[in-house]
Each structure stands twice: as C-alpha cells, then as structure tokens.
Amino acid sequence: MTQNAGKNDETDVEMGVKKNDSERSAASADDPREAFRRQPVVRAMHRAIVWSSVALVIVFAIAALWIHARAGLTQLASAALAFAFSWVSCTATSQSVIRAIRRGKTGGALTRRMIVSWAAKLCLVIVAAVAAIETMDIDRAYFGILLAIGIVVGENVNILVISRAPIPIIGDEIMRTHP
C-alpha cells in the first residue's frame, strides 16, 4: 500500500483498486484484530509501551554518554544490563494487560490481572538483578542505581500516559449492558 501525496486515498498494489477512508474503515470494522486495537485501553497500553521505551532510551543514552566519559567498559556493560531489565519491567505489565483484554477479561478481573502481573514482574526483576549481580562481572553501584532510575522513570511514564488516556471506567455489569 502506498499513499499519494496529500490525498487520503490508498492504492492496493496487487489489485490497483483505490480505497477511500470510509471504505477502509468499513473493511477494518469487520476485522476483529483491528476492532481490538481500537479499544481505548489497548491503545493506551500501546502508547504506554512506546513512551516508556522512549523515556528509557533517552535516560540510558544520557547515562551511557556520562559513563563513557568518566568510567570504563564494566560500568557501560552494567548500564546496558540495567537498561534491558528496566525495559522488560516497564513494558511487561502493559503487554500482560493487552493479552488479558484479548482473552476477554474486563473490570475487576482485568484489574486483578494487572496487579498480579505487576507484582510477579517486580519479583522476577529483583531475582534476575540479584542473580546478575552475583554471577556477572558488573559494577554493582552503577547497575543498582541505573536499574532503580530506569524502573522509576519507565513506570512513571506508564502511569502518566495511562492516566491521561480517555479510558472509560466500566465495571463488569456495565460492560455487559453497554459494550
């Protein structure tokens, strides 16, 4: 699919058929995957993943430049490992919520799933961080400080993005009567 300059028409390369916006939206309305992606909660979770990832890249790029100028390769490796752990930590809950919504969870069940996922993710990150500190040749101070900064920044960005999203507050009973 290509987009013409300045037009909202799309040309199907294989068929040579032009589709306008209404035809595309009618076709995508029948697609359950597209309808799923358009749900406000799913869109908010995807935005949270993107923005927390962007924030982490910025924070760790600044940290890497600072470390590179003042410290050695071990500290840089510690920062890279802290970035990986922070990124997994900050995107896991949103991905878990998206999977739960796909499986039909709503209201209280979705909230419980989010809390359990967040707690399990935090425990796994702590266990993995302790294992990394004990088994790898990394600078513990750099790793610990950057991991804490990464998780705090990433989770706060998640909270900010999700709290600003237009997500309707719907309980289980209301969801059944008003889809």
Image: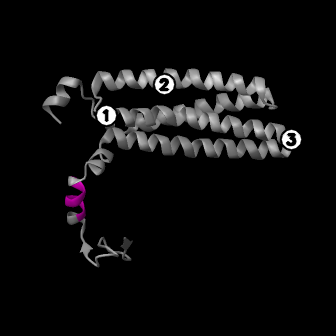
For residue 25, above or below residue 87 = below
Q: Give the residue type at disc 2.
A: Trp
* Residue linked to disc 1: 103
In which quadrant of the rendered image does the N terminus lie?
A: bottom left
Location of residue 130 (image quadrant)? top right
The amino acid on which the numbered mark 3 sits, given as a three-letter code, is Gly
Q: Residues within 10 Å of mark 3 (few under 14, many from 20)?
A: few
Residue that appears at 53% across and 26% down: 121
Question: Which structural element holds mark 3?
Answer: loop
Identify the residue at image location x=77%, y=26%: 135
Q: What's the magenta bit mostly, secondary-structure-wise?
A: helix
Q: Which mark is residue 72?
A: 3
Query: Which residue bears the numbered disc 2?
Result: 118
Q: CA distance from mark 3 to mark 1?
A: 47 Å
Furthest residue toward bottom:
16
- Residue 165 as seen in the image, left or right of residue 140: left
Q: Secondary structure at mark 1?
A: loop
Measuring from the top left, give residue 144's x and y in whole percent: 72, 27
Q: Provide residue 107's location: percent of width, then percent of height.
A: 28, 25
Task: Tell me which residue sits at (69%, 46%) in the image.
Answer: 61
Q: CA distance from mark 2 to mark 1?
A: 18 Å
Where are the magenta residues, as a range? 24-29
Identify whether 47 is placed above or below 146.
below
